């Protein structure tokens, strides 16, 4: 019998959550059920997802910011099909593949001139691990500084640059020499760097958890301090890269050149795992410092032809479609609309973001009844109100969003960069409705929070 993938999918569709529960991650399956996210999506096009009934969902999550050019972009799909049809000599290993050379060349054109050497990875966390190793070996120093609230991935090195106990608990000891500084606190950074034992200061220009923004002036000072004290400045642009913040890379906002730039996620249009670390030849040579050491850091799938082809095609799409400019414009429209809502709805405490990376922070309301609901929910667990709103956006409006981190009352928006004015309007209208519901106490949003808390307590 011949293999028929379509037939397999067709015959088993609908078993998704049960298969997840039985074979992969039962707790995650439980969470999906609990928050009403146990949908079966069967198709994705651009900024939209479709379920079995062909109902359309506006995806403001974009696979955690991998689908910047939109889901299943035809140009990238065609490139992959063409490559497949050519029966490529991929993963020979003992050769220098053409496509990785070409993608490296293109990445260099888009980034500061000093970043003239590229190392390819398969994920964001692998890029951060690479940055830690490159910084340590090229400086021969032990310490790594990182910021509060940062997220750089969940492998051991990246996890060592993370303060969230819910991620760290049970995994100690992590790698030594990693110390936290507060984001935007210049003095704290200066005093740590002055010890002259720091290999790297690693940070996200806009933090994924909570959408906290590194101030331009702080980033410029960080550059100056790292240079003065011989530490490598590492920008983790795994999430902020490729148009997300309204510039191709967020480093363009302050005009700062890091020593090491880590990218991943959107580089291959969400189709093939990929990542890259850009650095200077002198740092690279400090790691790969002899013929014996020519592969001292590497990974089997690192320059896979499909990832490379998807990357080249994706960068072509960015150029063709003006997506960076669209991210800036749609981001401004969204922020403007959200700020208007913040003026009318007391639960909204702050709206912040850059381009299409936006955080909506909720906070304690002033009016008595609502305050009571807020206090009750906060006592049960922080982050429940934001989670209840995210649930309502999906259940009542078919809009997919997320909370911006554990125990945070922040809703995060990171849609595909192809969204247009009608999507922005659709989101703002829906969010206004969710806000109206949540400003009624008692009401459905507050019932959600109690239900969620009860389940969390049962865990
Ligand atoms: C800023 C940042 N760095 C690193 C990572 C880790 O990437 P990955 O999940 O591909 O390992 C993420 C993932 O969300 C991220 O947002």
Image (cartoon, grey):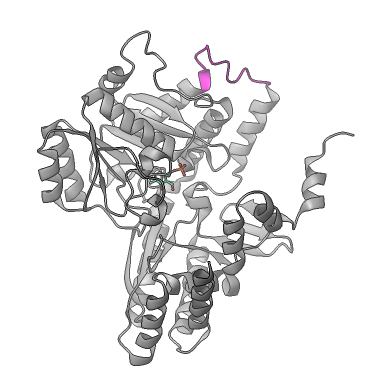
Q: Quadrant of residue 108?
A: top left
Q: Residue furthest right?
A: 1
**Dominant secondary structure (helix, strand or loop) of the stretch shown in magenta:** loop
Q: Is residue 26 above or below residue 91?
A: below
Is residue 90 located in the magenta-colored stretch of the structure? yes
Looking at the picture, tell me which residue is in the foreground, 167 or 282.
Answer: 167
Q: Which residue is depicted at the point 43% across and 35% down? A: 126
Residue 216 placement (x, y as % from top left) = 21, 50
Q: Is residue 418 visible?
A: no
Q: Is residue 110 above or below residue 286?
A: below
Q: Which residue is depicted at the point 57% across and 37% down? A: 272
Q: Is residue 45 left or right of residue 230?
A: right
Q: Is residue 367 visible?
A: yes
Number of numbered discs visible in the structure rendering: 0
- For the magenta stretch, what is the residue range? 87-99
Looking at the picture, tell me which residue is in the foreground, 457 or 122.
Answer: 457
Pick the quarter of the image with the N terminus. Answer: top right
Residue 142 placement (x, y as % from top left) = 23, 31
Q: Which residue is depicted at the point 27% across and 29% down? A: 135
Is residue 387 located in the magenta-colored stretch of the structure? no
Looking at the picture, tell me which residue is in the foreground, 210 or 297.
Answer: 297
Q: Residue furthest top?
A: 291
The quarter of the image that holds ligand 1 is top left
Q: Residue furthest bottom?
A: 368
Residue 330 placement (x, y as % from top left) = 42, 59
Residue 286 placement (x, y as % from top left) = 27, 19
Q: Which residue is depicted at the point 43% across and 85% down? A: 439
Q: Is residue 429 left or right of residue 222?
A: right
Q: Is residue 335 above or below residue 270?
A: below
Q: Is residue 141 left or right of residue 264?
A: left
């Amino acid at each position: 019998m011949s293999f028929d993938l379509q037939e397999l999918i067709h015959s088993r569709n609908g078993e998704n959550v049960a298969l997840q529960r039985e074979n992969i991650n039962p707790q995650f399956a439980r969470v999906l059920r609990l928050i009403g996210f146990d949908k079966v999506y069967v198709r994705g096009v651009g900024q939209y997802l479709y379920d079995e009934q062909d109902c359309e969902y506006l995806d403001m999550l974009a696979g955690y910011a991998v689908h910047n050019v939109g889901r299943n972009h035809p140009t990238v799909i065609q490139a992959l099909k063409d490559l497949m049809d050519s029966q490529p000599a991929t993963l020979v290993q003992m050769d220098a593949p053409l496509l990785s050379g070409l993608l490296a060349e293109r990445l260099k054109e888009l980034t500061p001139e000093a970043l003239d050497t590229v190392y390819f990875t398969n994920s964001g966390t692998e890029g951060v691990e690479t940055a830690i190793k490159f910084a340590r070996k090229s400086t021969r120093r032990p310490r790594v500084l990182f910021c509060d609230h940062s997220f750089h991935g969940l492998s051991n090195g990246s996890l060592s640059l993370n303060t969230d106990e819910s991620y760290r608990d049970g995994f100690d000891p992590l790698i030594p020499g990693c110390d936290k500084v507060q984001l935007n606190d210049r003095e704290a950074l200066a005093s740590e760097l002055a010890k002259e034992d720091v290999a790297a200061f690693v940070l996200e220009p806009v933090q994924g958890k909570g959408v906290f923004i590194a101030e331009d002036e702080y980033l410029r000072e960080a550059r100056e301090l790292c240079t003065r004290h011989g530490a490598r400045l590492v920008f983790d642009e795994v999430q902020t890269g490729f148009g997300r913040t309204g510039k191709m890379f967020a480093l363009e906002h302050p005009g700062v050149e890091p020593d090491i730039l880590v990218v991943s996620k959107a580089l291959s249009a969400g189709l093939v795992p990929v990542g890259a670390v850009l650095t200077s030849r002198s740092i690279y040579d400090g790691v790969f410092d002899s013929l014996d050491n020519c592969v001292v850091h590497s990974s089997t799938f690192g320059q896979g032809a499909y990832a490379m082809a998807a990357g080249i095609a994706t960068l072509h799409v960015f150029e063709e479609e003006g997506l960076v400019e669209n991210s800036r414009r749609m981001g401004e429209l969204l922020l403007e609309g959200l700020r208007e809502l913040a003026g009318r709805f007391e639960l909204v405490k702050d709206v912040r973001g850059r381009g299409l990376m936006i955080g909506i922070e909720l906070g304690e309301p002033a009016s008595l009844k609502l305050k009571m609901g807020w206090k009750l929910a906060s006592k049960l667990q922080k982050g429940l109100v934001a989670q209840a709103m995210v649930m309502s956006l999906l259940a009542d409006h078919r809009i997919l969003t997320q909370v911006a981190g554990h125990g945070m009352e922040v809703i995060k928006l990171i849609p595909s960069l192809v969204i247009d004015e009608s999507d922005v309007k659709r989101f703002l209208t829906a969010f206004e409705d969710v806000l109206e519901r949540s400003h009624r106490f008692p009401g459905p949003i507050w019932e959600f929070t109690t239900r969620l808390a009860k389940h969390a307590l049962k865990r």
